[in-house]
Structure formats: structure tokens, C-alpha cells
Image (cartoon, rainbow, N blue to C red):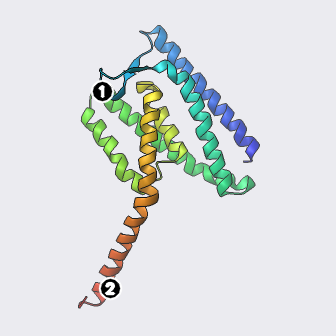
Amino acid sequence: MDKKQLFKARLYLTGIASIAVGALLIWDHYHGGVPSHHISANKDLPAISNWWGALLLPLLTLFLLYRIQKRAFDKYEGAEARRLLPGVLYGFAGALLFGILIAACFTFGYPDITDYLILALLPLAIFFPIYRAECLLGFVVGMTYTFGAVLPTGFGALVCLVGLVLYLYIRPGIVYASSRFALLLSLSKHNPRL
């Protein structure tokens, strides 16, 4: 896949996101009105209308797909950029399912499970690069139906920042310490005096 094909794919996927969020907003408008959501579900804080998703989701999709394309061509030369595609799809699908799971638990009245799922992002960030563009996009798309696009984008950006720190800076220390511990354990088995 070359840059021209990826550019076309970016435009098609942005168009699909635009049509999908537009259809959702039109459906909401004719079936009780477009909802607004308060930040942190606190009535004292301002409400954000889901209408902002009509602008935010297509722009976010276009930008994050650009980031994926840039990463693909920074990592691989020319047509070999398609090697990145399976990892991108897995990251997007995993984040999409995670976002849907959080939204479903919130919708069906399981706030404790929702809180645990959000806390589970911290250990996941140590083992998986959840800070990448495809993960943010999947997370936002998975939660857009329930929360609109604005709140998941803000929360997802915060999670990406924490995930970046955990994966790139904390994880190497954990890997180093566990490898040293495993080495000491194996040495103590061979030499009982240690």
C-alpha cells in the first residue's frame, strides 16, 4: 500500500465516520432530541452537546489516520507499509471493544464495573501500547453512541498520555527489574549459597 492508496483510505474512512455520526445525530434529533452530557456526570459542570461530534469525529478520524499513515511510512519503506496494518487493526478492534464494554456497563447501570474497567487501563498500558492513534480512535468510536464524541476524546487523550508514560518509561524499568530477578533466581538454583 503506497501513500496515495493510504490517502484515499483516509478520505473514505473519514467520510464513513462523517456519515455515521451525522446519521446518529439525525436519529437522535427526531427521536427525543440530541442529548448533552455533563463532564464527569456532574450536573454542576457544563453540559456538552453531542452536536459537537459532527465536527469533532471526522476531524479526529482524519488526524489519527494521518498519524497512522505517518508511522507506517516512518517505520517501513514504500510498499512495505502494509506490514503495520494487522497491528493497527488489532489495536483499533481491541480499543473499540473496550470502549463498547465501558459504554454498555454504564448504560445498563453497572458503575462499579465501569470504574474497574477504567482502572484496568493502567496495567494494560504497561503491556500494550494503548497510546497509539488507532487505540484512541477505536476507543472514541466505541463510546460515541453512548457519550457523544467530545467526552470520550478528552478522556481518551488523557488515557493515551498516561499510557505513553507507562509504556515508554515505566515498562522498561519493570522489564529490567524482572529480568534481573529471574537471573538471580536461576543463579540461586544452581548455587544454593547465594
- Residue drawn 37% across the image and 31% down it: 103
Considering the numbered disc 2 on the image, is that residue within a helix, a strand or a loop? helix
Residue where numbered disc 1 is placed: 108
Image spot of residue 73 (x, y percent): 68, 52
Find out whether the residues at labels 1 and 2 contact each other: C-beta distance under 8 Å: no
- Residue drawn 42% across the image and 29% down it: 151
Q: Which of marks 1 and 2 is in front?
A: 2
Could you tell me which quadrant the C terminus lies in? bottom left
Q: Is 74 located above or below residue 48 in the figure?
A: below
Residue where numbered disc 2 is placed: 187
Q: Residues within 10 Å of mark 1 (few under 14, many from 20)?
A: few
Disc 2 marks which amino acid? Leu
Image spot of residue 158 (x, y percent): 42, 41
Can you tell which quarter of the image residue 13 is in? top right
Count of numbered circles on the image: 2
Considering the numbered disc 1 on the image, is that residue within a helix, a strand or a loop? loop
Image spot of residue 22 (x, y percent): 56, 19
63 sits to left or right of 111: right
Image spot of residue 117 (x, y percent): 32, 42
Disc 1 marks which amino acid? Phe
- Residue drawn 48% across the image and 52% down it: 129
